[in-house]
Amino acid sequence: MNLPIGTPLTESISQSTNIQNLLLKEFPDEIELIVSKIGTSEVKVDPLPLESQEISVVLKEKKYWTKTKSQEELAVMFNEAMKQFPGIILSIQQPIESRVNDMMSGARTDVVVQLYGPDLDTLVDKGNKIIQLIKTVNGAVDVQENKVFGLPQINIEYDRKTMALYGIKVQQINNAIQTAFGGATAGVIYENDKRFDLTLRLVGEERIKPENIENLMIESQNGYPVPLKELAEIKESIGPSEIGHEKLKRRVNLGFNVRGRDLESVVNDVIATVDKNVSLSSDYEISYGGEFENFRRAKSTLSIVVPIALLIIFGILYLTFGNIKDSLLIYSVVPLSAVGGVLSLIVRDMNFSISAGVGFIALFGVAVLNGILLISHFNELGKNGVSDLHERVKQGMNERIRPVLMTTLVAALGFMPMALSTSVGAEVQKPLASVVIGGLLISTSITLFVLPVLYTLFTKKEKVS
């Protein structure tokens, strides 16, 4: 949760307490515990300002939930409940997922839009336009901006001519301001064997008042006190809170999460919308990172690994049977199993992910094994004198249906705990297991009917020729 820049610690604590009480009141059956961390965390390499905080929500087991059974829907409900607090920006994620995104791209969101360029004002202007465009894309939620500007500043411009008349030096004024607001050591206090620095500065209430700077007295060369407002022009302004750099350019990070749609389609829509409505000169560029970057890299790897795996499977089949006909017959179960895997994702309302892609590779291997059991036994019966194709298929199916079902059920039951997992890592385990289980059950049912028919047809054609 991000509050407006410059929010004091007392207000951050108050807002955190109000949100915790609200969530515990609205979701008593879903939430077990809430803990907030404000500002810098325990890890010193992970600094956060006082207006930023992490609210860790520990959920109860799903059997106790009453409002919903889906964690994604629960996140939407959290977001809706906290809309009554104006001025805050939220991003709801899993803890490890948030940390990994932060380490990779500097933002704790699924997708990070990084805008590079030389001029900070232009970056902020273009960034605000991109934020408004992202909010119009279906599936893009928790849109966050990098709050570059918004930090209150006091600028003191010295009038050197007036300072010269009073015989006052710049260093003298600097030391006075430093002493009044930052503090300066004026002596040492001893208590037995303990020693403490005696620090001189304005009291807490006076340090937060800008007018106290104007009335700060500076001693002139003749020993007369002169207020600072006669020696300098003091102005309040809004300045940058942080300036990020990367690739030898200034950088602004914009982020958003994806909910209700698959990651790739949402990002593609964002890219198309931004390219159409935002024009950038050659000095500026946009890149898209975060989880999308991981997905794109893993998808590129899968586009190489999957064809190689399929070729290896076909090569092993050819080496096993010694002919292309039987190899292609067994290979026909691959698209059948793929259909089953896709249907399982649709039934469980899951999007395609990298873990699901890995599940398809495992699915193809087990599905091909079922085909090998059938075709190899059909061929063995033919060598043993069963010349009638229909009788060969009937006898082969009768003798091999149990091994086929056993192979399928053992693999499916082995993945069942992953498919029903609700613990840490479930978002990775469930798509993989769902693809394997659903693909095997559907592909096996189809294979037991389709593969014998294909074997009969192709074997007949072979005999006629």
Image: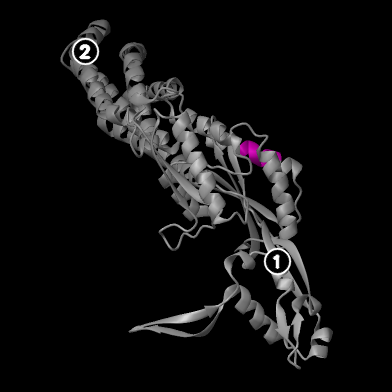
**In front: 319, or 279?**
279
Task: Please give the range of residues in magenta.
Answer: 268-273
Residue lying at 43% horizontally and 63% vertically, measured from the top left: 44
Residue 210 is tagged as 1
Asked which secondary structure carries label 1, the reply is: loop
- Can you see residue 363? yes
Q: Which mark is residue 441?
A: none
Mark 2 falls on what kind of element? helix
Sequence order check, earlier mark of 1 and 2: 1
The crowd level at tag 1 (other Cα within 10 Å; few <14, some 14-19, many 20+) is few
- What x and y, as percent, mark residue 75? 49, 33
Q: Amino acid at mark 1?
A: Pro
The quarter holding residue 45 reads bottom left
User: Viewer-proximal residue, 287 or 451?
Assistant: 287
Q: Looking at the image, which residue sits at the far bottom?
A: 222
Up-down relation of residue 103 to residue 64 (above or below): below
Q: Looking at numbered disc 2 in the image, what kind of residue is underneath it?
A: Gly
Is residue 246 shown to the viewer in this render? no
* The one of 48 and 136 positioned closer to us in this rendering: 48
Q: How many marks?
A: 2
